[in-house]
């Protein structure tokens, strides 16, 4: 049963992150190679808006569904099928001739993947027992990285060799194959699904914020994650300024470093249970701080290729390790009846904090240079770790086991 759960989780997280990292990593490079203007490419970040705002419609996914198929299984299959159809449709578009349609298509793709993520996270909260969540979130983080390797590095290589149409059709085929585990899975509900009489919406979100200690936890989420995002955002232009080619950057970031992240997530997944949630957050957070410090090597002029690979690998391993217990505690703080809303709200806070830090990183780098922005990133990460030490206490998992409804056959 555990192997079945982990296989299902892996396939779901890999498949939903392939399009996301295709948009984020591969598409801007390919568009530039095709002669698309920088002004047009600059509009691409707009397509991540659904990722930041997905908490707004997460109560709808919690409340409504075709339970005969399995409540969250129904949503996952629908969203992923629509993703496949969208990718196939985009394959027959010319980038230069239909840029507006392409941008809208990518926005739709982002919306569908974000919505699928709500249902996938809620499904995982339901069928992973507390003692399984460490390894389960290791698989989740690994799936994210694997999707990044395929969607970012792999698809960029295919674009250079096969072109736009064949690459997107290949992506659609991979997504279709990834549907098989969820189609074979049977989400079973022990009791009729309890649904609040109030309509889903703002009240559900407000109630989430009103939970005891939730405000402090959300502040910790922001600081624990933002420093890493700030540093990672400036690492890419640093590689360009150093003089690396697009192919070298793609191999370094899109393939090698993300593969290292998979290793870090798996290691953390196995260690969370023996270490405990709190100790894992502290230990892996400390490792990540030391890893971010390695960014200072290229920032101060140590730019030979082995050092750059060492930096990229160390950072991504540490990110994979630190992210896994964070996701695990986010699951612990999600009630089963509103799992999609609860987990998505926390995830959105992480995204908001990360995007704000990323936006600030460019201005900070302009004033203080690369060493300055990396130093501030380290300081923010230290604050996040100190907040974990001071505020977060290991506790039990209220309203999770007692309300458990979804189990694996």
Image: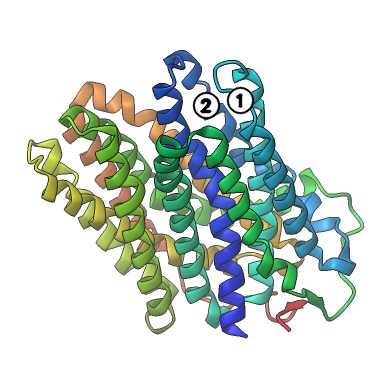
Q: How many numbered discs?
A: 2
Left or right position of 328 against 357: right
Helix, strand or loop status at disc 2: helix
Which residue corresponds to the image point at 66% horizontal and 22% vertical from the top-left?
101
Using the image as rendered, state which of residue 246 and residue 282 is in the foreground: 246
Q: Can residue 329 be seen in this view?
A: yes
Q: Can residue 55 be seen in this view?
A: no
Rendered location of residue 64, percent (x, y): 86, 55
Disc 1 designates what residue? Answer: 103
Q: Tell me whether circle 1 and circle 2 mark residues in contact (CB < 8 Å).
A: yes
Rendered location of residue 41, percent (x, y): 47, 21
Q: Quadrant where the N terminus lies?
A: bottom right
Q: Name the quadrant containing residue 169.
A: top right
Which residue corresponds to the image point at 17% horizontal and 46% vertical from the top-left?
308
Left or right position of 4 against 310: right
The label on residue 44 is 2
Rendered location of residue 128, percent (x, y): 62, 76
Using the image as rendered, state which of residue 400 and residue 108 is in the foreground: 108
């Amino acid at each position: 049963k555990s192997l079945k759960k982990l296989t299902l989780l892996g396939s779901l997280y890999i498949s939903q992150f392939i399009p996301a990292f295709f948009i984020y990593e591969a598409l801007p490079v390919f568009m530039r190679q095709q002669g698309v203007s920088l002004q047009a490419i600059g509009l691409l970040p707009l397509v991540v808006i659904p990722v930041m705002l997905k908490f707004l419609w997460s109560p709808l996914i919690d409340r409504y569904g075709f339970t005969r198929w399995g409540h969250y299984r129904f949503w996952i299959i629908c969203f992923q099928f629509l993703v496949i159809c969208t990718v196939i449709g985009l394959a027959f578009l010319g980038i230069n001739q239909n840029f507006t349609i392409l941008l809208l298509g990518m926005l739709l793709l982002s919306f569908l993947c974000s919505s699928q993520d709500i249902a996938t996270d809620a499904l995982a909260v339901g069928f992973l027992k507390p003692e399984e969540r460490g390894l389960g979130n290791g698989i989740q983080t690994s799936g994210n990285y694997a999707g990044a390797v395929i969607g970012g590095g792999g698809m960029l290589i295919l674009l250079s060799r096969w072109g736009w149409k064949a690459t997107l059709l290949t992506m659609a085929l991979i997504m279709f194959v990834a549907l098989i585990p969820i189609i074979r899975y049977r989400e079973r509900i022990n009791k009729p699904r309890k649904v609040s009489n109030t309509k889903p919406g703002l009240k559900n979100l407000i109630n989430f914020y009103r939970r005891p200690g939730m405000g402090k936890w959300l502040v910790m989420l922001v600081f624990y994650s933002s420093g890493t995002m700030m540093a990672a955002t400036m690492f890419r232009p640093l590689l360009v300024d150093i003089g690396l080619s697009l192919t070298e950057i793609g191999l370094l970031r899109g393939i090698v470093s993300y593969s290292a992240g998979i290793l870090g997530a798996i290691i953390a997944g196995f260690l969370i249970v023996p270490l405990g949630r709190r100790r894992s957050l502290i230990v892996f957070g400390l490792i990540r701080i030391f890893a971010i410090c390695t960014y200072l090597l290229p920032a101060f002029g140590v730019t030979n290729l082995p050092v750059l690979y060492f930096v990229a690998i160390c950072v991504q391993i540490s990110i994979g390790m630190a992210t896994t217990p964070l996701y695990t505690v986010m699951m612990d703080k999600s009630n089963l009846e509103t799992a999609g809303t609860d987990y998505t709200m926390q995830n959105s806070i992480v995204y908001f904090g990360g995007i704000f830090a990323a936006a600030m990183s460019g201005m900070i780098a302009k004033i203080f240079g690369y060493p300055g922005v990396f130093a501030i990133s380290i300081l923010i990460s230290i604050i996040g770790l100190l907040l974990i030490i001071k505020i977060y206490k290991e506790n039990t998992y209220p309203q999770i086991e007692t309300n458990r409804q979804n189990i694996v056959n």
